Amino acid sequence: MSTKQAGMFLTLIALMIPSASLRAADDKVDGDLKKVQGKWSVPSANGEGKVTYTITGKKLKVVAPSRTYEMELTLDEAAKPEKSIDFKIVEGPDDAKGNTSKGIYKFDGEKFVFCFAPQGDRPTKFEMEGYEKILVSLTKEKE
């Protein structure tokens, strides 16, 4: 390797290091995000099977009997008066892709509970309101 090639190689490595460390910090899993890692479930609304929620890093995959969604998950445990959760749909039905649903979340013993609005404003309480505000209480699955 010539001196010029070695210099270009070292410059390339130096340029890559900051972006790799920024990416690592952005992908950091701690606090409440660390608590929710793994597979969770809830019986389906129609009583036919269950809906599973698998959280890996900041990615959420929801598998229901009739459809599957892949989302980016954002938790803000410092939000007041309730902790906030956002679901940005990356894969799913065409009319849902790119949409972000806003919600609130809490832990109730071993349960991960959240209430979200598929569209519109973030809920302010943990209660179901038709299809405008949806309340979900997940149970962690055994590994």
Image (cartoon, helix red, strand yellow):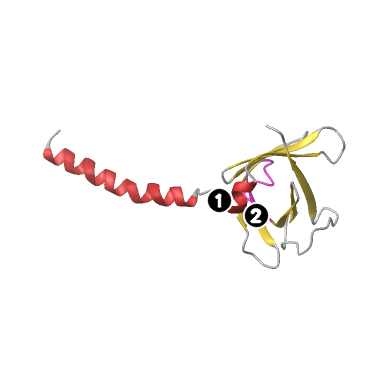
Residue 50 colored magenta? no
Q: Residue furthest bottom?
A: 81
Q: Amino acid at mark 1?
A: Asp
Which one is in front in this view, the residue at disc 2 or the one at disc 1? 1
Rendered residue at 85%/41% (across/down)? 45
Rendered residue at 79%/35% (across/down)? 50
Q: Nearer the viewer, residue 55 or 36?
A: 36
Instruction: Please give the residue where the numbered disc 2 appears in the rendered image.
Output: 86
Rendered residue at 70%/67% (across/down)? 81
Q: Nearer the viewer, residue 142 or 137?
A: 142
Residue 127 shown left or right of residue 72 in the figure: right
Coordinates of residue 21 in the picture (x, y in percent): 39, 49
Residue 12 shown left or right of residue 3 in the figure: right
Q: Nearer the viewer, residue 27 or 122?
A: 27
Q: Is residue 80 above or below residue 114?
A: below
The answer to which quarter of the image holds residue 142 is: top right
The region drawn magenta spans: 87-102
Instruction: Please give the residue where the numbered disc 1 appears in the rendered image.
Output: 30
Rendered residue at 72%/61% (across/down)? 120
Sequence-wise first label, 2 or 1: 1
